[in-house]
Image (cartoon, rainbow, N blue to C red):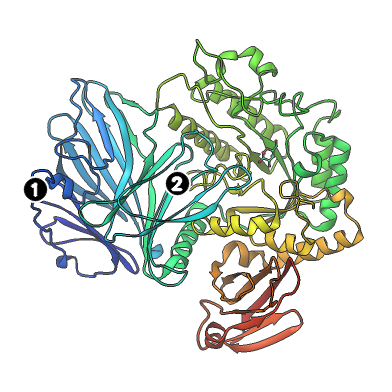
Amino acid sequence: MGIKLNKIENVFALQSKNNTYAFGVDDMGLIRHLYWGSKIEDVEEFEMPKLFEVSTNDPVFEITKEEFPVYGSLRYKEHCLKATFNDVCREVVYKYVGYEVKDNELIIKLEDKHYDFNIDLHYILHEEYDLIERFVTVKNNTNDVIKIEKIHSGQFHIPHEDLIFSNVHGHWGAEQQKFNQKVSYGKIVIENRRGISTHNHNPYFILSTNATETTGEVYFGALRLSGNFSGVIEQTQYGGTLAQLGINSHDFLLNLKPNEEFTTPSIIAGYSNSGFETMSNNLHNFAKDNILRKGLRPVLYNSWEATEFKVNCNEQIKLAEKAKEIGAELFVVDDGWFGQRDSINNGLGDWYVNSEKFPEGLNPLIDKVKSMDMLFGIWIEPEMVNPASQLYKDHPDWIYHFDTRESDTSRGQYVLDVTKKEVKDFIYNMIDDLLTNYDIDYIKWDANRPISQTNVEKDLWYKHIMTIYDIVKTLKVKHPNVLFEACASGGGRIDYGILGIFDDFWTSDNTDAYDRLFIQESYSYIYPIKAMRAWVTDCPNFLSQRIIPMKFRYHSAMMGTLGIGCNILKFNDDDVQLSKELISEYKDIRHIVQEGDFYRLENKSKNRYNTYQYIKDDEGLVFVFLPQSEIGHRGVNIKLRHLEKNSKYLLKIKDQEISKTGEYFMNCGIDVRLSGDYDSMIIKFNKIK
Ligand code: GLA
């Protein structure tokens, strides 16, 4: 394992547990991709094939599988870098100048042949997770500005044609809808131009060859960036497929000043020859071990669906008492507690406690919550301002705008230009004051509209999100115990850029337990369960109008980090009793849900069952859902995954206990029958010897 070089030091192999990623430097000094797939131990086996142009119209530059193609020379293909120098030369011509290995990181050093401009290609090897992380640093050592018009974080080459590309599509309330698309000639482009929202596509690629959960080859990469990203997938004219990810070059221009350096967001990438399950597990484990904060996530209660903007101290106290009674550990006051916030049209920007709703401030509520030994959380939307607010009256120039145009509102609000120092300071100080003056454990940070009418430099789209990352990172230094939830009108900010800086994702405003099964399943391909907030809410659901039994709603939400968003003051005794039981059950199993390995179990029942497995050390769970019983009303055979073949397991289905070997449960499986619509169950098992 590790970073390996061949004897003449022109081939580099990143050897992880099961895989190899190899590339090298050819005699023209081009950094050429050689291999990505199952392990090839001996780096000496790799050779740098000599390239011959196919014809004068198909030059060598076009054919070469470059790790980081730049714009210039006889290249017409997708490039990762386009730069314009001061004298208007618009091509980069690089030469290889050496490499550096630092622990698990390999840096390939390139230099422009004429201009004093460096490009470093970084590869970090995460051996145990079969993942590599790639990013690029460019440095301007000239005395003039270099204009960077495009900079993607890297290019990958997949040695197949006719692949299946998977990503998600969607919109508000319908995020994370997985789609599979055949790759053929031409390009597939996914992107976000909104600055904030990624309800539509998500910054990753999955490219597979006839893969299932457990078989087939899968190549994947996820970009660590929120906001404007772009991804390109192209089946090339010369065999194979390429994939790129990075900052969207739409309305982007980076003026790299003398002595300035710029580092792109990284791509976490990997290969699996055993289907999607391995991909998800490697990413999940990497995130759990290296990105996410340790510790189990509390069961939260959130007031939004119960009270919307009509919050008041007494009612919130009553909700908190009830939340405590059913077993919640964290009480979050959502929108409506500040400024003149009675609707979407006012309040944002005026972050003082509304004295009509909270005559004695927030402390009576916080004290009550704390006296019941619960954590306290609060909603904010710091990047935004309503035109009617005092903040906007005082600082009309703090929003993104063109001087000669009127800026558009969306959800009744403008976006603050957080790249202005005074605005960044205002936001930081506002949150720091909140966290200093009140005993707050949890921040739900929302962002309910895309950015528009950006007035300043064109790298602002990128700078905006970097500023937000920076504010939260700085706040966490001073307030290390506070958890941050990333929300953008639901799941608009789910990506590996924000993960780790924020601790929880609000997965979607769509809280319909049936819809959620699909949203959550799509989410799980790339993102860890531990960051997936899921609430139980009232029926009929505000969005779907569906009425779903409470047990199914709980089970659906118990698949992630459980929250309750019902108007619990309206609960009858049965609702309270069931909530108590299921929240208590969740607390018993949450270490398996949040920290275990997750498997999407395939089943062949004619009745459509959703079946999922979690396993942590010697304990496991199987969630079984039957959304709708279909004609024939069949049961389902469920084959468990990743048990130890020769160990004995005890499995509990309702009151029945079955003890068999891992081999039996994996090969023969268990037969389960649910009945009626919206039936569900959680099966528990553990290794006994
Ligand atoms: C967004 C969020 C919701 C809620 C409202 C409050 O829509 O996604 O969960 O916080 O804002 O205005």
Q: Residues within 10 Å of mark 2 (few under 14, many from 20)?
A: many
Q: Regarding ligand 1, which quadrant of the image does it lie in?
A: top right
- Local SS, label 2: loop
The percent position of residue 212, horizontal first and vertical second, equals 45, 69
The quadrant of the image that shows the N terminus is bottom left
Question: Which residue, given by chain and number where applicable, does mark 1 sit on?
Answer: 55
* The furthest residue to the front: 631
Are dots 2 and 1 in contact, CB under 8 Å? Answer: no
Residue 205 versus residue 662 in the image, above or below: above
Spatial CA span between label 2 and label 1: 36 Å
User: Relative to residue 348, is residue 39 depicted above or below?
Assistant: below
The image quadrant where one finds the C terminus is: bottom right
Residue under the point 66% across and 64% down:
590
Residue 635 appears in the figure? yes
Please name the residue that numbered disc 2 is placed on.
Answer: 203
Q: Quadrant of residue 554?
A: bottom right
**CB of mark 2 near ligand 1 (< 8 Å):** no
Q: Residue at x 71, y 55 (%)?
A: 299
Residue 247 percent location from the top left of the image: 39, 38
In the image, is 193 to the left or to the right of 2? right
At x 54% / y 87%, what residue is drawn?
647
